[in-house]
Image (cartoon, rainbow, N blue to C red):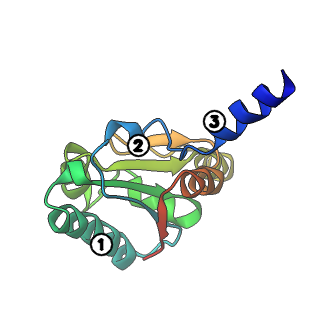
Amino acid sequence: MMTRFVILMAWFVSFPVYSAESDAKPFAKQRVILQVSDADPTKYTSTLDISNNLIKHYQGPDFIDIEVVAFAKGAQMFFADDNPNRTRIASLIDNGVRFYVCLNTIDTIHRRTGKRPVLLEGVQGVQTGVAFMLEEIQSGFTHIHP
């Protein structure tokens, strides 16, 4: 009985692990997570350019799985107020790119300023951005920090 259990467990852990979100793109040839952690508009532009270029390179959004996670000072990339990247981010969301912001960062900003930043529509919150990124890397995503 114990031998069957060990064989079954070995079989189970031999399968690659992907996040539930990744299962939404079963034909993706690559899975990429882009880190934004600096308050640098040129890095925001670079991140969006990379996302767009990858979609073109892989000949469509179904063949590349892209996530962008922002934390620390990079969270500003997703603030709704006067955001010059609003249209580009919305377009990338329409093309299957997922955008995440660290809620610990948002909570810290709220505590320090007394105002909770309004985020762009379609940006999803994750409690701990770095932990989320690490979990995605473990599940098969390649980390890129523009």
Tell me the tag on residue 22: 2
Residue named by callout 1? 45
First along the sequence among labels 2 and 3: 3
Question: What x and y, as percent, mark residue 63?
Answer: 24, 53
Judging by the rendered image, the residue that carries numbered circle 3 is 12
Q: Amino acid at mark 1?
A: Thr
Q: Name the foreground residue: 73 vs 14.
A: 14
The residue under the point 29% across, 71% down is: 50
Q: Is residue 114 left or right of residue 94?
A: right
Residue reaching furthest to the right? 2
Quadrant where the image shows the N terminus: top right
Where disc 1 sits, the SS reads helix
Which-is-in-front pick, marks 3 and 1?
3
Asked if the residue at tag 1 contacts the one at tag 3, i.e. Cβ–Cβ closer than 8 Å, the answer is no
How far apart are the two marked residues, 2 and 1, measured between alpha carbons?
24 Å
Q: Position of residue 86 (x, y in %)?
A: 25, 54
Look at the numbered disc 2 and give the secondary structure of its residue: helix
Q: Residue at 18% x, 50% y: name it.
A: 91
The residues tagged by marks 2 and 3 sit, at their Cα atoms, a distance apart of 19 Å
* x 31%, y 42%: residue: 25
Tell me the residue at 32%/75% (across/down). Answer: 46
Give the side of residue 121 with respect to residue 4, left or right: left
| 128 w.r.t. 45: above or below | above
**Given this view, does label 2 or label 3 mark the residue nearer the observer?**
3
Residue 134 in percent (x, y) is at: 62, 57
**Disc 2 marks which amino acid?**
Ser
Q: The C terminus lies in which quarter of the figure?
A: bottom left
First in residue order: circle 3 vs circle 1 = 3
Question: Would residue 92 appear left or right of 8 to someone viewing this image?
Answer: left
The amino acid beneath tag 3 is Phe
